[in-house]
Amino acid sequence: MTEKLQYEQAVEFDVDLDAEALSIEIDAPESAAVAEKIEYRKRIASDQPVPAKKHMGQTAKNRIANTVIYIVLSAICVVWLLPFFGIVFESFRCESTGLAGYIFPKKWGFDNYVRLFTDENSNFLKWFGNTLMMGLITSVVQTVFVMAVSYALSRNRFKGRKLLMNLMLVFGMFPGFLTLILLYTWMSDWGLTMENAPWGLIVIYIAGSGMGYYIAKGFFDTISHSLDEAARVDGATQIQIFFKIILPLSKPIIIYTILMGFMAPWGDFVMATFMANNTNAGYNVAAGLQWLLTDSMINEYYTTFCAGGVLVAIPITVLFMLLQKYYVAGVTGGAVKG
Amino acid sequence: MATVKLTNVKKIYGKNVVAVNDFNLEIADKEFVVFVGPSGCGKSTTLRMIAGLEDITEGTVEIGDKVVNDLQPKDRNIAMVFQNYALYPHLTVYENMAFALRLLRVPQQIEQKDGSVKTVYSKLSQDEIYKRVTEAAEILGISDLLLRRPRELSGGQRQRVAIGRAMVRDSQVFLMDEPLSNLDAKLRNQMRAEIILLRKKIDTTFIYVTHDQTEAMTLGDRIVIMKDGYIQQVGTPAEVFDMPSNLFVAEFIGAPKMNIVEAELTREGENYFVTVFGVKLPVDGEKGEALCNKQAEEQKILLGVRPEHMTLTNRSNPCAIPCTIQVIEMMGSELHLHVLAPDGTPLIVRVPTVQLTTQQVAGLVAGARIYVTFRGKVMHFFHKETQFNLLSEQTSQSVKSESDSHSQWYHN
C-alpha cells in the first residue's frame, strides 16, 4: 500500500538551505558580573586538594575494642550454650541417674537412651508418637487454614475486614492457657481428654490457627496485585489464581507455616499436661518427660529425661537446618509489608 | 477487532472521590487511542474500567456493540499489558504466554445422533497452544527466550513477553497501561518504535495509557487528554498540537511547554493585533483570518507561543521584545534559552543552532540581553477567564466539564 502511494502525490517544498544566519543582536552582560565569574573560576582552578589527615593509632584502638567485644560475646556464648551441652553430657552419664553437681560424666554410655525405650515407667515411644502425630496433622491443617485466611484478608475487601483483623490480633495476645479450664470441660464432654488428649489438642491447635494469619498476609501483600489482575484478564477464577499463581509464589511462607505448626506440639507443656490429666498414654513429649521429673522419680530418671530431651531436639534441628533458607525468606518476606 | 464505546462513564471511589467524570468516547475498529494526562487524571482508572478490573459507577462501556459493564475481564475478550509487566515469576516465558490459552475454553457446536446441536466447551490442544505461542514469540523476536524465567530477562525482554502474553489471545481490544514507563530512556524510545511496527502486525483496537506526551503524540491515531477525571480534548496529534482547546492542553502537549503571557487583543478593521510587554504584534496569516471569521472581540487574553515558534531578532525590528538570558541549555541541534521578559515573566526560546554562527552562539551567555519575536500564525489565544482557546469549537461536553474544574486549576 505504501509503495503504491509513493509517487502519486508528491509534495514539493521550497526551502532555501543557504539562507543566511539569523540577524540577531546580543548585548553582553555587564562587565562586573563577568569579571566576578572569571575570578571565581580562577579561584577554583588554583585551589590545591587538601591532603587527608592520618589518624595515628587507629588500628591499635580497634584491636582493643575488638578484644573487649569478643570477651563479652564469649561470656554470653558460654551462658547460652551451657544448658545445651549440659543436657547432652548428662544424657550420656552412666554412673548415676539422679541430679549431679557436675557436668562431665565420669562414665560415658548409652544406658539412658536404652532405658528410655525399655524402662516400664518410660513410655517414650508413645509420647513421641503422640507428638509426631499432632505435629503432622496440625501443620497440614493449620497451613491450609492460615493460607486461606491470609489470602482472603490480603486480596478481598469486605465489610468488617479491618475489625476482624484487629480482633484476631487482640485475641492472639490473650494468654491461651487462661481458657484452659473451659477448654478442658468441652474436650472432656467430647471425650477428647485423658488418653485421647492428643486429638483434643489437635482440635485446640487448629481452631485458633487462622489467627496466625499476620505474617502470611504480609507476605501475600508483597505479591503485586497486578499479577492477580493479569491472571483475571487471562481468564483465571479466584480459586485458580490462588492455586496457580499465589501459592506457587509463596513457598517460603508455606514452609514457614508448616514448620510453625509442626513445632507447636513439641514445646507445649501447660495445655498438654492439663488435657492428659495424669494419663500417661495421652502425654506429649514435654508432658511425658516432665512426668519423669516428679518428686518420686527424679532421682531415678533425671539422666533418662536428658536423653529424651536430646532425642526430641534431633528431628526439629534437622528439619530446621533443611528448611532454614525458606524459614528466613518467610519471616523477612512477610516483614516487608507486614 | 472491535469498536469501543464509552457513554457517560463515571467512577466514584468511596463516597465522594470522583476519579472519572462524564467520559464519552467512541473508538473505531483498529484505531490506536492514547489516554494521556498527569498522574491522578483518571486515565488508568478509565482503562481499568474498560478491562473490567474496576467497577463502573455510572454509564456504560460497550465493546463491539455489547454492553460489558457486568462482564468479568475474561469474558470481555480483551488483552492487557501492565506497567510492571505482571509476568508470573514462577513460570517460564512459554508458560507465561500459554497461561491464558490453557484456561481458554472454546465453544464448539457438536451435532448429536438425534440431530440436535449441543455446544461443548473444549480446551485448546497442546499443538494449537504451541503454535500460537511460537508464532507470537517469532513476531516479537523472543523465540530463544521461551524456556527462561522472567527474572532472567532484561527489562525490554520482559516487556516483549508481556506484550506476547497479550497477543496470543487474539483479543478484540488491546489495552496497555503505561507499558514503557519502567524502561530507561533509550530502551523506551526503541520500544516505542517497536510498538508502532507491532501495531501493524497485530491490527486490532488499541487503547494506550501514558503520562508521556511524546508517547502520546508518536503512537496515537487519536489522543485523549485528561485532567482531574475530565476529558480536556480529543483529537489527532496534529489537532491537539495546532489547536489546543484550552490552556491545559496547550501546556501539556509539546516540550518544552508553551510560553503563556498576558496580552491584549485589539482590532483595527479587519486586522487583529496583540500587545505584549508593550510591543504590538500583528496577527497575520491563518490565525488572523480565523479571528476575523470568529468576529473575536477586543479583550485581555492569555497568549500562548511555543518555544520553537519564537525566534531571535535584532534591536531594530519593531516587533522585538527585549529579554535577559537566565539559563542556556545546549541540546546540540538547538539551544533552549530560558529568558526573562521585560516584566519578569519567564519564557523559553528554542533556537536551532544551524541558524546561528559560532560567534553568535558564543555570545549567548547568562545575563546577556537578546531580542525575541514571533509571528502571528503561531500564536494561540486563550480566554483569560475560561482559558478556552478563542478559536476552537467547544463541544457542550467539554464546556460542562470545564466549568467546574478549570477555575480551580488555574489558581493553583
Image (cartoon, coloured by chain):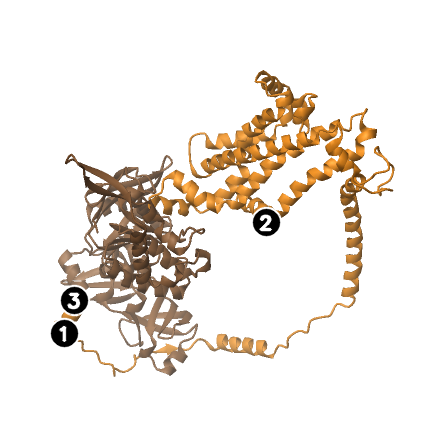
Quote the CA–CA distance across marks 3 and 1. 12 Å
Point out residue B402 in the picture as x, y percentages from the top left corner: 27, 47
Residue B42 visible in this rendered orientation of the protein = no
The hue used for chain A is: orange
Q: Are marks 3 and 1 in contact (CB under 8 Å)?
A: no
Closer to the camera in the image, A306 or B235? A306
- Residue A285 in which image quadrant: top right
Residue B67 visible to the viewer:
yes
Which dot marks residue A7?
A: 1
Q: Residue at x 39, y 39 (%)?
A: A238
Report which residue position mark 2 lands on: A325
Circles 3 and 1 on the same subunit: yes
SS at circle 1: loop
User: Is residue B316 rendered to the left or right of residue A291?
Assistant: left
What crowding class fits label 2: few (fewer than 14 Cα within 10 Å), some (14-19), or many (20 or more)? few
Vertical position of residue B363 compared to residue A220: above or below: below
Q: Secondary structure at mark 2?
A: helix
Amino acid at pointer 1? Tyr
Q: Are marks 2 and 1 on the same chain?
A: yes
**Residue B15 in the image: x percent, y percent?**
37, 34
Counting from the top left corner in percent of width and height, residue A187 is at 59, 20
Against A111, residue B247 (above or below) is below
Chain identifier of the brown chain: B
Q: Chain of mark 3?
A: A
Q: Which mark is residue A1?
A: 3
- The mark that comes first in sequence, 3 or 1, is 3
Mark 3 or mark 1, which is nearer to you? Answer: 3
State yes or no: discs 3 and 2 in contact (Cβ < 8 Å). no
